[in-house]
């Protein structure tokens, strides 16, 4: 075989091979494009065919047909009512202003309260009269008289003075009738208490440092629990009853509700109360109270100070500061020390310390109707050298009375 023939054979074989390969590719592509034939029976897991129209229809049931008259319509629904409009809440009425009270006149008030005083002081006055009425006044009897006076807190020195004078007077008197003994005891008790002191509360105005007239300024001081704020409120009633206009200064900022308590007392008699925040500076409030009193042309400004323990040096010093700040307006006319009569000799300890801080000018004895220690009047006057000016004889609003020695002694010894 020559070279030409060999080339032709190779070419033919190549053409044949290429054609076969090409046919296989085309055949493969065609097979991939054609979808598989659907199976003759559905597969178990195949989803059910979609229902066609009419497949769910049921065979009609034999029922009696109703005429239109027999058909009952469903009841009509009740119309839904619109929710009623809520009435507009009316604004609460403004609280009515408290009715201003007219306090009892102070003249003779202690006489009206005499029965309360006599009930609590029987052991003093009546006890002395009983002892002095004995036929023989031996040493034992005089010792009993001394014990009666000491028990009533008259004090050691005043008791000794009174017993010595009674010894002399009884010796000179000789025969002793009940009337003579009562007159004798009354006279000696009045000497002991004193009748020549000015017991009026100093409320007269004065000229301030700038030449402007300022009201009378009264400071009320005392320890906790003596009824100091209540006494200040009652004193406002006493002054209003005497025809004076009053401004109250609530400088007790340490005790909760003290300012509210004082304001309530003031509103009852038409007196304005100047107050500040709880825990505020007492001296600043006292200063503002006097300033307000000047602006209102008030007759008196009452300053209620915080109740202080006499053993607390810092608080006592602050009390002195209150007085110094108030005096920037002008002089303080009165400093009243409130003492609880039931504390007895302990009240003297309090009185001494307060007198060192501020110049006490008068004493108010509270709860005098509930104790047999009325002799504290004598002891505190001797201790401070100032008079008892007011006494509290009950819980009522008008149970604070100007102290009258004669009425007091008459209540002690009876008629």
Image: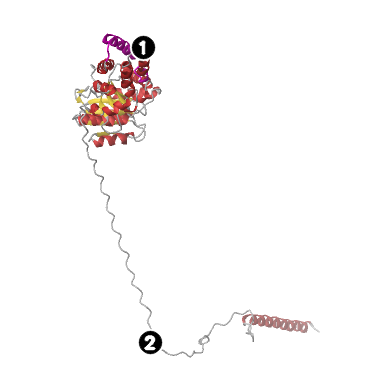
- Label 1 neighbour load within 10 Å: few <14, some 14-19, many 20+: few
Q: Earlier in the sequence, mark 1 or mark 2?
A: 2
Q: Which residue is mark 2?
A: 70
Residue 335: percent from left, percent from top? 28, 23
Residue 414: percent from left, percent from top? 27, 23
Residue 390: percent from left, percent from top? 27, 25
> Considering the image in quadrants, where does the C terminus appear?
top left
Q: Residue at left 57%, top 82%?
A: 49
Q: Is residue 380 visible?
A: no
User: For residue 190, what is the image quadrant?
Assistant: top left
Q: Nearer the viewer, residue 407 or 17?
A: 407
> Considering the image in quadrants, where does the N terminus appear?
bottom right
The kind of secondary structure the magenta stretch mainly shows is helix
Q: Is residue 172 visible?
A: yes
User: For residue 288, what is the image quadrant?
Assistant: top left
Could you give the CA–CA distance between mark 1 and mark 2, rounded to whole angstroms?
128 Å
User: For residue 281, what is the image quadrant?
Assistant: top left
Q: Which residue is mark 1?
A: 138
Determine whether, in the image, residue 264 is placed left or right of residue 205.
right
Is disc 2 placed on a helix, strand or loop?
Answer: loop
153 falls in the magenta region: yes
404 falls in the magenta region: no
Q: Nearer the viewer, residue 21 or 110?
A: 110
Residue 145: percent from left, percent from top? 35, 16
Q: Nearer the viewer, residue 47 or 238?
A: 238
**What are the residue bounds of the magenta stretch?**
150-176
Is disc 1 placed on a helix, strand or loop?
Answer: loop
Q: Where 223 falls versus 26 (above or below)?
A: above
Q: Residue at left 38%, top 79%?
A: 74
Determine whether, in the image, residue 158 is placed left or right of residue 33.
left
Q: Nearer the viewer, residue 262 or 176?
A: 176
């Amino acid at each position: 075989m020559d070279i030409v023939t060999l080339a032709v054979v190779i070419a033919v074989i190549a053409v044949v091979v290429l054609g076969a390969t090409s046919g296989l590719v085309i055949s493969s592509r065609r097979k991939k494009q054609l979808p598989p034939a659907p199976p003759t029976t559905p597969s178990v897991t195949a989803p059910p065919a979609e229902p066609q129209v009419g497949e769910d229809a049921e065979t009609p049931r034999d029922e009696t047909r109703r005429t239109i008259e027999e058909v009952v319509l469903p009841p009509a629904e009740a119309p839904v009512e619109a929710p009623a409009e809520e009435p507009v809440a009316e604004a609460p009425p403004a609280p009515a202003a408290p009715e201003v009270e007219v306090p009892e006149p102070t003249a003779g008030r202690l006489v009206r309260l005499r029965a309360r005083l006599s009930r609590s002081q029987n052991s003093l006055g009546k006890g002395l009269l009983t002892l002095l009425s004995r036929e023989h006044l031996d040493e034992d009897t005089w010792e009993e008289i001394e014990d009666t006076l000491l028990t009533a807190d008259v004090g050691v020195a005043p008791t000794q003075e009174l017993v010595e004078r009674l010894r002399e007077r009884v010796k000179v008197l000789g025969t002793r009738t009940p009337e003579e003994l009562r007159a004798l005891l009354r006279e000696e008790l009045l000497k002991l208490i004193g009748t020549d002191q000015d017991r009026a509360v100093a409320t007269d105005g004065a000229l301030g440092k700038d030449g402007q007239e300022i009201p009378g300024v009264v400071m009320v001081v005392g320890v906790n629990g003596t009824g100091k704020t209540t006494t200040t409120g009652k004193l406002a009633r006493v002054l209003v009853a005497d025809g004076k206009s009053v401004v109250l200064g609530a400088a007790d900022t340490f005790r909760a509700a003290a300012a509210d308590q004082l304001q309530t007392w003031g509103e009852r008699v038409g007196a304005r109360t100047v107050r500040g925040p709880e825990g505020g500076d007492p001296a600043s409030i006292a200063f503002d109270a006097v300033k307000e009193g000047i602006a209102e042309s008030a007759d008196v400004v009452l300053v209620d100070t915080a109740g202080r323990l006499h053993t607390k040096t810092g608080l006592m010093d602050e009390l002195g500061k209150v007085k110094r700040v108030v005096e920037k307006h002008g002089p303080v006319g009165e400093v009243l020390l409130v003492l609880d009569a039931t504390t007895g000799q302990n009240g003297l300890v309090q009185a001494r310390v307060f007198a060192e801080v501020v110049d006490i000018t008068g004493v108010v004895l509270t709860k005098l109707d509930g104790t047999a220690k009325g002799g504290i009047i004598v002891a505190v006057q001797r201790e401070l050298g100032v008079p008892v000016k007011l006494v509290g004889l009950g819980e009522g609003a008008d149970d604070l009375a100007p102290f009258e020695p004669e009425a007091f002694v008459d209540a002690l010894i009876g008629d």
